[in-house]
Image: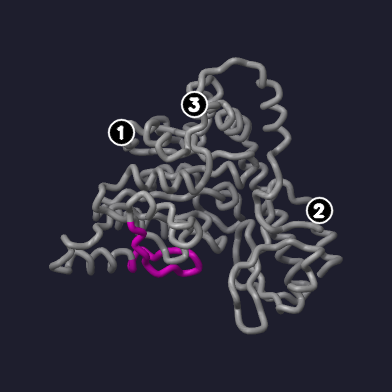
């Protein structure tokens, strides 16, 4: 069986594994106080062109979302998200478990619109009873979105402007950020994100690492006692060198961007193959996730040959499935897929 199920079904890039072996017997301080974590932070600051950024390493995406949101919000506040946002749809209520409501606005192929965000906030504060309601305290977006779509620079600037007007921190989920930055269709750079977002994270788990995400606070806005709070949320590794070494390798010589570009090249070939074979795209994704409408009987015939992700029912006779490429996708896998299709 070949798998295009997700971008984290294989292990880690060989360069990361090699570096972990090379440093395995070194004694390093724990909890991110090691020399490799320190070096990785410097590399990330340089890549973001944000020398004052505070960079912290957490173990995974859900833990990162829940920790950052919970520690930024006041007890009476919630976080605004698209209805299709990961925190609203696919994290098992992790944010709500921290005591904060996810406040949803419409999603358009995964994205929120600055005008609709403004309307939501205007309507909220025009309500004479808003003191009895959950207060909006943060705006959450993901880039790429759940549907592999991307914000343009002008869209990000418009959302950031609304957030500034209402003094709301803008938080970007970057679990697949590398694939967004490498897209052939993007005009957004990592320094743009650091400039416009108050906090974001650079995903490692889905972009070549064994595990780990790098959270970047860009405005001197790290929550107080943040390490203590990471630990309370189960997102702190005692052997912090593990995440530090991985991000050191990913950002030392641009490997993060190199493997992301590879995944995009594979995704473009995958998209062309699917279209050539007569499949319909559910939407046009410019990143490593491709969403395809498949007849149910065809999907059933793939069961023992091809792994993909169920996304949603399209109609009685068709299902939307997701194909995902990654750092480890090969030409040989694409050739095997063509034979199946």
Marks 2 and 1: which is nearer the front?
A: 1
**Could you tell me how far apart the alpha carbons at marks 1 and 3 are, in whole angstroms?**
17 Å
Front in this rendered view, residue 208 or 94: 94
Tell me, yes or no, whether the two marked residues, 1 and 3, touch with CB atoms within 8 Å.
no
Secondary structure under the numbered disc 3 in the rendered image: loop
The residue depicted at 13 percent of the width and 68 percent of the height is: 128
The residue depicted at 66 percent of the width and 21 percent of the height is: 24
Q: Is residue 144 left or right of residue 226?
A: right
Give the residue furthest to the right. Answer: 339
Residue receiving disc 1? 224
Asked whether 112 falls inside the magenta stretch, the response is yes
Residue receiving disc 3? 32
Q: Is residue 149 left or right of residue 263?
A: left
Residue receiving disc 2? 331
Q: Residues within 10 Å of mark 3 (few under 14, many from 20)?
A: many
Indicate the position of residue 122 as horizontal and vertical percent values: 23, 66
Q: In which quadrant will I find the C terminus? A: bottom right
Q: Is residue 19 left or right of residue 196?
A: right
Magenta stretch bounds: 101-116
Q: Residues within 10 Å of mark 2 (few under 14, many from 20)?
A: few
């Amino acid at each position: 069986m070949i798998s295009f199920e997700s971008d984290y079904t294989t292990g880690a890039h060989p360069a990361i594994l090699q570096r972990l072996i090379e440093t395995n017997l070194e004694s390093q301080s724990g909890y991110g106080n090691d020399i490799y974590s320190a070096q990785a932070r410097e590399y990330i600051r340089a890549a973001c062109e944000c020398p004052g950024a505070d960079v912290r390493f957490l173990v995974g995406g859900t833990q990162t979302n829940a920790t950052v949101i919970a520690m930024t919000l006041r007890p009476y506040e919630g976080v605004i998200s698209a209805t299709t946002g990961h925190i609203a749809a696919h994290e098992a209520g992790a944010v709500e478990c921290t005591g904060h409501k996810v406040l949803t606005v419409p999603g358009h192929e995964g994205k929120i619109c600055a005008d609709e965000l403004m309307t939501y906030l205007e309507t909220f504060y025009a309500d004479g009873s808003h003191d009895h309601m959950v207060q909006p305290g943060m705006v959450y977006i993901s880039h790429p979105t759940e549907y592999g779509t991307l914000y343009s620079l002008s869209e990000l600037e418009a959302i950031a402007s609304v957030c500034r007007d209402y003094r709301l921190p803008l938080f970007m989920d970057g679990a697949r950020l590398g694939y967004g930055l490498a897209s052939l269709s993007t005009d957004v750079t990592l320094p743009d994100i650091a400039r416009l977002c108050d906090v974001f994270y650079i995903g490692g788990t889905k972009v070549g690492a064994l595990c780990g995400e790098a959270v970047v606070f860009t405005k001197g806005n790290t929550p107080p006692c943040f390490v203590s709070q990471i630990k309370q949320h189960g997102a702190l590794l005692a052997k912090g060198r593990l995440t530090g070494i991985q991000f050191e390798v990913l950002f030392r010589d641009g490997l993060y961007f190199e493997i992301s570009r590879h995944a995009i090249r594979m995704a473009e070939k995958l998209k062309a193959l699917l279209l050539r074979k007569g499949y319909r795209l559910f939407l046009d994704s410019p990143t490593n996730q491709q969403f395809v409408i498949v007849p149910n009987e065809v999907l059933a015939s793939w069961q023992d040959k091809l792994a993909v992700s169920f996304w949603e029912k399209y109609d009685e006779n068709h299902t939307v499935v997701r194909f995902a490429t990654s750092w480890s996708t090969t030409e040989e896998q694409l050739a095997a897929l063509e034979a199946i299709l």
